Each structure stands twice: as C-alpha cells, then as structure tokens.
Amino acid sequence: PASAPAGGACDPLLRRGAEMIERRRQTDATPPLRMWGEPAASSYQLRSGSYMTTSIKRPSGPSLFELFACEVYACDVPEDRYNVINRPDHWLHQRKRGEDGFVFVLNVIIPSAANLIMLAYFREPSPGAVTKGDSAAARLFCAWCDGTDAFRNERFKLIPRVAKGPLLIRRGVGAKPVLLGKRITVLYHRQPGAFEVDIDVSSDRFADRITRMVRDAMASSVCLDLAVTLEGREAAELPEAILGAVRCDHLDFAACNHRLPPAASLKAAATLKVLTAQL
C-alpha cells in the first residue's frame, strides 16, 4: 500500500491532517495519523442565505463540528455494526462532564466479510457552540436531532468527493450532495451529549458496488473525502453549513481494523457481575 498521503500542507481541500488536530482521541482502533484528516469546509459549495430566491451557492463557513477521532472496527457480530455509541464499553461514557461538548458521530458500514465499520467523531468547537448556538445551521441541527426519522431522512445530505483516485472511481462516487435517507438505510441513535448516524451502504445495490470498489482500491490509490450537511429549505434555515467532514487518505482497511467484542458478551458479563455482588 502507498504510504505517502495524497493530501498535504498545500492541499486546498484539506483543513488539517490528523497529526495537526489538537486534543484528538486515539484508541487501538485509530488508523495511522497519515491516513485520515479533516477537509476544509470552505471547499464545499452549499446553499447561500439567498438561495430560495437566487439559487446561488457559496463556500460553506466554518463547519459546525470539528473532527477529533477516527476508528475502524471489525465486528464479530453483524448487529454490532450499529448503535456503537450506546455500547457499555464505549469510551464516550468515560468522558468528564462537559468534555468535548456535544459529539456527532458518523458511522459508515462498509460492505465486507469482516463486518467493517468506520467511525468519524466530531465535537463542538467549544461546549454549547452548536447546541446553544443561534445560527441558522445550529438551529436546524438541534431541530433535526429532536425530529422524527422521516424528517431526518428528508434533510441529511452526504457530499462524497474523491480528492485523488482512478477516473472510474471518481465517476462512480461523484461529488453531488445526496439525500441518503431517500436511497439507502440510515439509522439514528442518541445518548446524552452525543448523536450517531449509521449509513448502511449495503442496503443499495449501486452504493454497495461503488463502496466495495473504493474499499479495495483505497490503500493503493484513493483519497476520499466525506462531508455531511443538512438541507435548508426556507430562508430561516439558510445559509447551510458543513456539519463535519473526514478524509480517508490511502486508508488500508485490511490492516487498520480493530476487533470489536460482541456487545452481548459485555451485557452478559455485566449481569453476572451484578448477580455475583448480590450473593
């Protein structure tokens, strides 16, 4: 696999590589720092404040959330690919009160025999910056979190972009915003102070095929950016802003995956511990 990252200090699409992220969270499942980073929000054209009357798009302002962690897991049990933040052993439960503020988690379920998932974690720039913010994008995000799954599916957009890769993959992935909930299965999970979105790529035949192609070529020749935003449909919801963005830069899924223990075994162990304490 290629070891040299496709991005760099002079890459206009990249805000910062993982090594430049302050207070980043690293675990056994974190890929090498050269393999991930945060694209620049300003490199995406989104609906402007006047879009409803002019149809003009402009570069996004600063993203609502900032990337601070990335993990790749191989799950023994397929069901464990979903709702990761509510596992009893997840490190989010160990945070100090108020640490990192509200956390938004993007969970990409990658078609594979190993049941791979890639998680990108985004935090508020400062506690309350989004959840108590007064920008149109912040208000829409809070309403979206509190809304129904139908409302969430209507507004959640993924913007894929191949920063570097073969022409066939660039054409297959494209670069247009996609309302994912209208095409594939998207699941939503909450816990106090955090929100997870699960993107089940395998639920759509075309998306499954393209993702497998990207997965197999990623280590040798692909640098992929994924950004998410919420679609504004009236003046009070504009301008749009990037929620968060993550770059996978020649990420080697074959080498970078950490085994995720079955959640059922953790629950059984916890139950046994309680029963033993009662004896």
Image (cartoon, grey):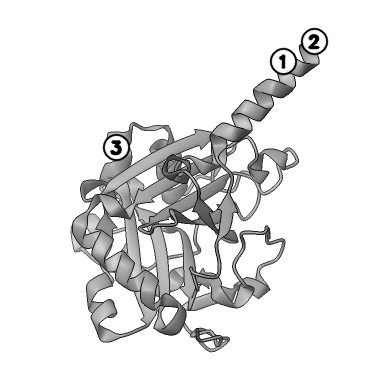
Q: Secondary structure at mark 3?
A: helix
Q: CA distance from mark 3 to mark 2?
A: 49 Å
Instruction: Answer above or below: position of 81 versus 16.
Output: above
Q: Secondary structure at mark 2?
A: loop
Number of numbered tags placed on the structure image: 3
Q: Say whether marks 3 and 2 touch (CB < 8 Å).
A: no
User: Which quarter of the figure has residue 163?
Assistant: bottom left
Q: What residue does disc 3 label?
A: 151
Q: Nearer the viewer, residue 186 or 142?
A: 186
Q: Residues within 10 Å of mark 3 (few under 14, many from 20)?
A: some
Q: Say whether marks 1 and 2 touch (CB < 8 Å).
A: yes
Q: Nearer the viewer, residue 47 or 74?
A: 74
**Which circle, 1 or 3, is nearer the viewer?**
1
**Mark before the other along the chain sequence, 3 or 2:** 3
Q: CA distance from mark 1 to mark 2?
A: 7 Å
Residue in view at x 44 percent, y 42 percent: 82
**Mark before the other along the chain sequence, 1 or 3:** 3
Residue type, numbered disc 1: Leu
Instruction: Answer above or below: position of 120 versus 181.
Output: below
Q: What residue does disc 2 label?
A: 279
Residue type, numbered disc 2: Leu
| Residue 139, position as x, y percentages in the image | 44, 42
User: Which quarter of the figure has residue 264?
Assistant: top right
Instruction: Indicate which disc residue 219 carries.
Output: none
